[in-house]
Amino acid sequence: MTSNFQHHVGVAVNRAGVIGRRDFVRGLSLASAAAGSLAWTDLLSLHAAELRRRQMSCILLWMQGGPSQFETFDPKPGHESGGETKAISTAIPGVQFADNLPHLAKAADRLAIVRSMSTKEGNHQRASYLLHTSYVPLASLRHPSVGSVIAQQLASAACELPSFVRIGNGFANTSNGGFLGSEFDAFAVQSAGQLPENAQPSGSAERFQQRLALLSRMEQTAIANPGAQQDHAKLYAHAARMIQSSQMQAFDLSREPDKVREAYGKTSFGNACLLARRLVESGVTCVEAALPGWDTHFDNFTKTRSLCSQLDQPFAYLLKDLDERGMLDRTLVVWMGEFGRSPRINPRAGRDHFPRAFSVALAGGGIRGGRVLGGTDRGGEEVAGPAVSEKDLFQTIYKSLGIDAAKEMMSPIGRPIKFVDGGRPVAELFS
């Protein structure tokens, strides 16, 4: 998935002195579309200066496909719902995780586990949208994703990197900037450990500046709408500033000591977690890293064991690394997928979609670690105690970051829409 911003970066960087007519016209169309939404963002008068001063950020570890709570944070050993998965003790007295997560079990004192998540969406695309926006999808409106809202609220002008970065390919059709505009779309990094595509100038710095000057002259003569021309120029200026910035070194994992890279695990997801830490350390406000493959309708136990082996060490060390660097208090880490998996094990040794009762893990950002909130009944069929909805979760995320979830955005049709419409922060996670 490549953002509109990256398309512009590619055009700005990779054309050999002359921009093709179709690329240029396409760029103008994108800039014109973005211009209509910029006006709405100008209407938002939030306490942005204070939020940016605090330098809060968020890392979302997205388990695309829907991870099984039984094989991760809510095992049911000895019950038929638990299957072959065993449980192990954790750093939280009396609390067990699945034996697939030995590193996270030791790091449980930094984690808050919500075992009572419950939603009503069991379709991948709709549930992914819901767990990225707190809204059900609508044909007439695209809501901004949580990363886009965080970027719009917290991004600092001092950071020359994109304010919202996504790592990996395991994303469903989530909304990105939605009606906030394309400037809040995620900047996509296909593989951590490599510099982003279309983000390196070709040729000398002098030649690059000549290309930008040529582009500026073409815009002044080709774009009749001054506002659209200014927005288009702003987009290219941002791209040019980024690719010439020394902060781009944040994407270069080879600058990390070998012992740190080994501690994260030199795997795709390990690299993604390390890159996420480097990016928030450099001023990026939201990083989303994907670990896909959790749609385990068959061979659930073998697949989840493999996925957990990819997840366990990087996630645990990310928490340790953030903590030891003094970053955990101002970095909220959220682990979740679009729903959980069914208590019933199907004839193919798999688990099916199950949004009624599943788990989410949080750490940092003022969240009190070393606790489990809520739970499920003995077989994992129902939430035991108060359920936590997607709106409650988003209220909690925004409270952690200092964002006013009740603040209204103006949609393109003139309808005010809150960041989160309903729900309440889960107060027990902060006390």
Image (cartoon, rainbow, N blue to C red):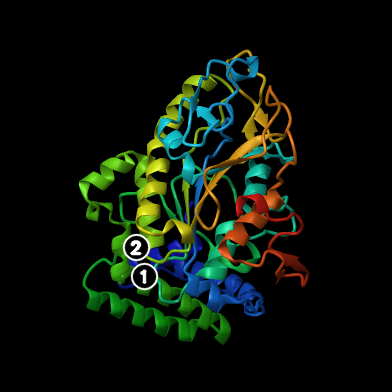
What is the number of the mark on residue 242?
1
Q: Quadrant of the C terminus?
A: bottom right
Using the image, determine if residue 123 lies above or below residue 233: above
Q: Distance between the residues labelled 1 and 2?
A: 8 Å
Q: Which image quadrant for residue 115?
A: top right
Residue 415 drawn at (x, y percent): 78, 69
Query: Quick check: 335 left or right of 209?
Result: right
Residue 334 drawn at (x, y percent): 53, 49
Residue 36 drawn at (x, y percent): 64, 75
Instruction: Give neighbour class at mark 1: few <14, some 14-19, many 20+ (Cα, 10 Å).
Output: some
Q: Which image quadrant for residue 416?
A: bottom right
Query: Which is nearer the eye, 220 or 263?
Result: 263
User: What kind of element bears circle 1?
Assistant: helix
Residue at 50% of width from left, 77% of height from top? 232
Using the image, determine if residue 284 lies above or below residue 158: above
Residue 149 visible in the snapshot: yes
Q: Which of the two discs, 1 and 2, sits closer to the camera?
A: 1
Residue at 25% of width from left, 53% of height from top? 256
Instruction: Give neighbour class at mark 2: few <14, some 14-19, many 20+ (Cα, 10 Å).
Output: many
Query: Which is nearer the eye, 335 or 316?
Result: 316
User: What kind of element bears circle 2?
Assistant: loop
Q: Which amino acid does label 2 sit on?
A: Ala
Provide the residue designation for mark 2. 199
Task: Choose the circle earlier in sequence order: 1 or 2.
Answer: 2
Using the image, determine if residue 82 lies above or below residue 175: above
Q: What residue type is labelled 1?
A: Met
CB under 8 Å between discs 1 and 2: yes
Q: Which image quadrant for residue 117?
A: top right
Query: Which is nearer the eye, 374 or 196?
Result: 374
Residue at 53% of width from left, 69% of height from top? 154
